[in-house]
Image (cartoon, rainbow, N blue to C red):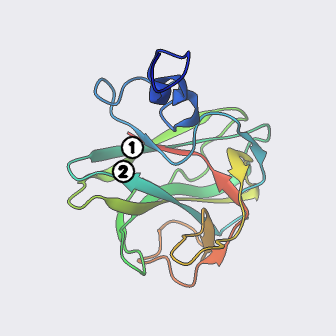
Amino acid sequence: MTVHGRYTGLVREDLGWLSSGASRPSQDAVFHRANLPRAPLGDQAALTSGVMTSVPLYLSAGDLVTNLTFISGGTAAATPTNYWFALYSTASTPALLAQTADQLTAAWAADTAKTLALASAYRVVTSGIYWAAVMVAAGTPPTLMGAMGAKPVLSGENNLAVTSGSSLTTTAPATIATPAFKRTIPLVIAS
């Protein structure tokens, strides 16, 4: 008999589907970090045109972040004029570290993983909670695959998603200033 009763395997491996790495390749083989597990996710109206949505993303010292990926849900972007992704620091007022090129009017179809390269890859110096952001200015922004979350309850908890800025176009703001709680939490993958 083991300390796990009749189960003789490793509990952490059996419960692996609960971690954000479930159903993804080994991080030793393919570098990636994600803010949410792949399931259960749903089609979320996570974006407002011209407003940045940011989510916390744990990165480890030594990670080299080259790309950010967000996945559209069942609604495609309709008449986009600008969209980009950005990576922000761990500071109490997160500072812009890197941004992707503005995608202007490029299509973003429904149910499509959109992977964009940061203008400059970022090598993580200090492990911690960084922020990954997405902004789409469009007649109708795409829905994004993600989850729903509650406001922080305990002291020290972060929001799981925030919005900031308005009437944004080509450039990410220098900081995530005056963030507001956002209930919808888009999935982001850094690679």
What is the three-letter code of the residue carrying label 1?
A: Asn
- Is disc 1 in contact with disc 2, using a CB cutoff of under 8 Å? yes
Residue 20 place in picture, x, y as percent:
51, 38
Residue 33 badge: none
- Determine whether the residue tagged by mark 2 lies in a helix, strand or loop: strand
Left or right of 145, for residue 190: left
Looking at the image, which is closer to me, 36 or 133? 36
Residue 177 at x, y percent in the picture: 51, 82
Q: Is residue 166 visible?
A: no
The residue tagged 1 is 67
Q: Residue 118: which disc?
A: 2
Crowd tier of the residue under label 1, counting other residues whose Cα lies within 10 Å: few below 14, some 14–19, many 20 or above: many
The answer to which quarter of the image holds residue 26 is top left
- Residue occupying image coordinates x 72% and y 56%: 46
Image quadrant in which you'd find residue 174: bottom left
Q: Residue at x 51, y 65 (%)?
A: 170
Q: Amino acid at mark 2?
A: Leu
Q: Is residue 10 above or below residue 125?
A: above
Q: Residue shown at 28%/28% (left/top)? A: 28
Measuring from the top left, give residue 107's x and y in whole percent.
64, 40
* CA separation in Å, label 1 and label 2: 6 Å
**Furthest-bottom residue in view?**
178
- Judging depth in this view, the residue of 64 and 15 nearest the camera is 15
Q: Earlier in the sequence, mark 1 or mark 2?
A: 1
In the drawing, does residue 144 fall left or right of residue 103? Answer: right
